[in-house]
Amino acid sequence: MRLLLFALDDVDRVFDHRDVAEWPPGSLTTAERLGLVRSASGGLTAACPHCEDRHVEIVAKRAGPDGHDRLWIYCPEDLRVEVTPEMCRGWQVHPQGSAAAVASALSFTATPVAIVPDRLWRLGRIPWQGKTREILLARRLQDSDAASVAAHVGAGGRSVVLVPHHVPDDRTWPGRVPATISLSRIASIADGQFVLDGAALLSMVTEADEVAEQRSLLPTDPEVKKRIVRQQVKAEIKGHLQDDVLVAARKTFGSTRKAAAELTKQLGRPVSKDQVQRAIDRSGGLEALIDQDDSGSVDRRVASQSRDRAKKISQRR
C-alpha cells in the first residue's frame, strides 16, 4: 500500500513485471480490482531481464523461423534479448480510481469531483463539531506548481486535505494552513478492501487544528496576512469607539440601566445594559472608572515651566 501511495505522489511511475513479481501473491489483482492501478499507457516497452540496471527498451516484433512473431529488445551487453508478452506489460497508479477508493473508504457515495485534473479532488463533507468540513484529496504537492493546485483549496483553513504521502511545506498554502493528513499513515488493504483508520484520522485532524491555533491565527501568505490585519485593526478601532460611547453614557447617567435606555433613544437601535456592563469590564471595571473620575477632578492650569505657559495647556492628571 505504501509503495502505491509513494507512486501516486510521483510522476509517471511504471511497475514492470519484475516489480510486481516481488509483490505479495494476489496484490496486483486486488489493486486492479480496487481501481488503484491500471495498465500503463504508451508504446510497447520492456525491461531487460539480464542487466542489473533494468534498462527499459522499445520492443521490436520480428517473425521467427516457425512463422510466429517474436519480441526483442536492444541490450548494450547482449545486443538483442528476447522478451515475452508478459514482460512487456506495465502498470501505473490510477489517480481517479485512487480518489474513488479513498471516497468509498470514507463512506461517501458520490463520485469524487476533479477540481484540478489528476491533482485535486473534492471527496465530500463530514460532520465536525456541529458543522461540516470538506474533505479533499491532493497529489504531487511537492512539485514546483504545487501552489497553483493548493490555491483551489481556499485560504480559510477549514478543509481537510488528504495527500498520498508527502505533506507539503506550510508556505504552499495561500492562507491558513489546513489539516493535511498523509494517507500512508492511515491507509491499508484489509480483507481485499481499501480501508482508512477513522479514529486515527480524526485524532490527526484535531491535532493539526491545535497546532494551527498555537502557531498563529494569521496565514503565512503576506498579502492575505496584511488584509486580515487591516480587518482586525478596523474591528478593534470600531470596538474601542463603541466602548467609549457606552462608558461615557454610564458616567453621565449614573447606572448601566439608565445608560442603556438613553443610548437606545439616541441611537435608534436597542442597546442592552449587558452591553454597557461589558464595555465597563473591558475598560477595567467600575472601580477603575471611579478612580479616573477622582483623579481627573484636579486640573493644573498654572504652568510650572515657561514652555508650558507659552503653550497655555491644561493637563489632567
Image (spheres, grey):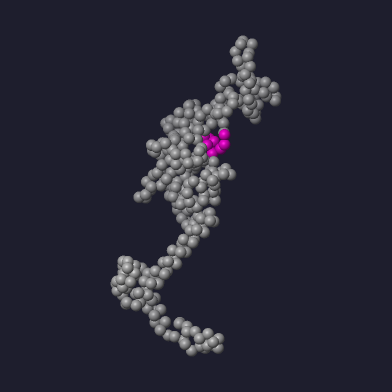
Percent of width and height locating residue 302: 48, 89
Q: Is residue 61 above or below residue 313?
A: above
55 on left or right of 99: right
Q: Is residue 184 above or below residue 312?
A: above
Percent of width and height locating residue 189: 45, 34
Percent of width and height locating residue 290: 37, 78
Main SS, magenta residues = helix
Considering the image in quadrants, where does the C terminus appear? Answer: bottom left
Q: Is residue 187 visible?
A: no
Q: Nearer the viewer, residue 260 or 37?
A: 260
Q: Nearer the viewer, residue 86 or 186?
A: 86
Percent of width and height locating residue 46: 60, 25
| Stretch in magenta | 2-12
Q: Nearer the viewer, residue 197 or 80?
A: 80
Residue sitting at x 41%, y 47% = 133
18 on left or right of 274: right
Residue sitting at x 54%, y 46% = 148
Residue 22 lies within the magenta run: no
Q: Quadrant of residue 21?
A: top right
Q: Residue furthest top?
A: 66
Q: Is residue 233 visible?
A: yes
Residue 3 lies within the magenta run: yes
Residue sitting at x 63%, y 28% = 56
Residue sitting at x 65%, y 26% = 51
Number of numbered discs overlaid on the protein picture = 0
